[in-house]
Image: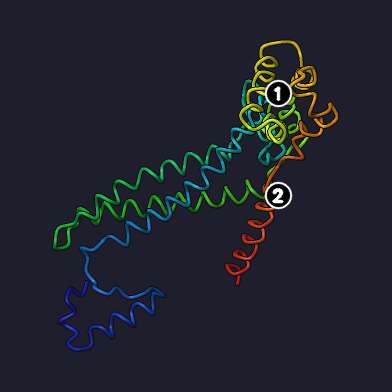
Amino acid sequence: AAGTAASFGDQGLEVQARMAAHLEMPAMAVPARSIMDHLAEHIMVLALLAASCGKFANEIYTGMKQEFAEVEEPISPGTVGSSTMPQKRNPHLSQDIMAYAAQIRTMLPLALEAVMTEHEANRQTSLMMRHAQNQVCALLGDTLERTRILAEGLVLKPERMRANLDLTEGLIMAEPVMLALGEHVGRQEAHDIVYDAAQAAAGGDQSFSDLLSADPRFSQHLSPGQIQEMLDPTRYTGLCSQLAEQQARRARELSATLND
């Protein structure tokens, strides 16, 4: 601790600059032990990074549930999911990531409280900030490593994804049907017609497509063949592929700069 650097005479700024260079860190504009805003900001940024990892893990955790079964995290041979239920394949990585991310978030209030240091150095708030930094950095290291393993070994199940889409028997594709009909009768009337068919399909035995075909308000404008085309979810993905490929390229570019 150098305080005002008065003991260094007119060499204070040079000493600070050389020390910062040695540590490969920027020098503070106004060095003071009572300033902790930047340390709190550091923890906030790390907490946001952990939250992003946690959100990703939560999506995998949900997708692994038996009711969805659309994805699966990498599970090494011999991994035991349960001592009593040998069939279980638990999302351990996802659960670890979510738990660590949650613990990291709990450090934010402590870091922000430490910012409220009095005008002089205060060991109390220094201890608070130090504890928050230690916990966050250690937990984030584990979080990032597990996220890497999860992303690299993630198993996708497109057949199950398609099967889940087909559970509604076309109801999930009511929007493009409505928009196509709207070109003939106007959007509001099209909404009413498709709404009637959708509600009848949800509560009855007839399929959505059969109900549409049987409704003269619809069938006079669009054929059964056109209906089947519009009920295909692969034909209504919008910008999904474009955005995914765009962000994948961006991620590879950023990764290359980090490796350099």
Q: Position of residue 95 (x, y in %)?
A: 54, 37
- Tell me, for residue 53, which label it has, or none: none
Q: Position of residue 155 (x, y in %)?
A: 71, 41
Type of residue at label 2? Ser
Identify the residue at the far right of this view.
225
Q: Quarter holding the C terminus?
A: bottom right
Q: Quarter holding the N terminus?
A: bottom left
- The residue drawn where x is 24% and y is 49% is 113
- The residue drawn where x is 82% and y is 32% is 226
- The residue drawn where x is 61% and y is 35% is 91
Q: Is residue 101 above or below residue 194?
A: below
Report if the CB atoms under discs 2 and 1 are less than 8 Å apart: no
Type of residue at label 1? Thr
Q: Is residue 132 left or right of residue 6?
A: right
- The residue drawn where x is 19% and y is 79% is 5
Label 2 residue SS: helix
Q: Is residue 91 left or right of residue 114?
A: right
Identify the residue at the far bottom of this view.
10
- Tell me, for residue 241, which label it has, or none: 2
Q: Position of residue 216 (x, y in %)?
A: 77, 19
Label 1 residue SS: helix
Q: Is residue 257 above or below residue 126?
A: below
CA distance for labels 2 and 1? 23 Å
Q: Is residue 165 above or below residue 84?
A: below
Q: How would you rate the neighbour count of disc 1 (Cα within 10 Å): few for under 14, some for 14-19, many for 20 or more? A: some
Q: How would you rate the neighbour count of disc 2 (Cα within 10 Å): few for under 14, some for 14-19, many for 20 or more? A: few
Q: Position of residue 7 (x, y in %)?
A: 16, 82
Q: How many marks?
A: 2
- Tell me, for residue 168, which label it has, or none: 1
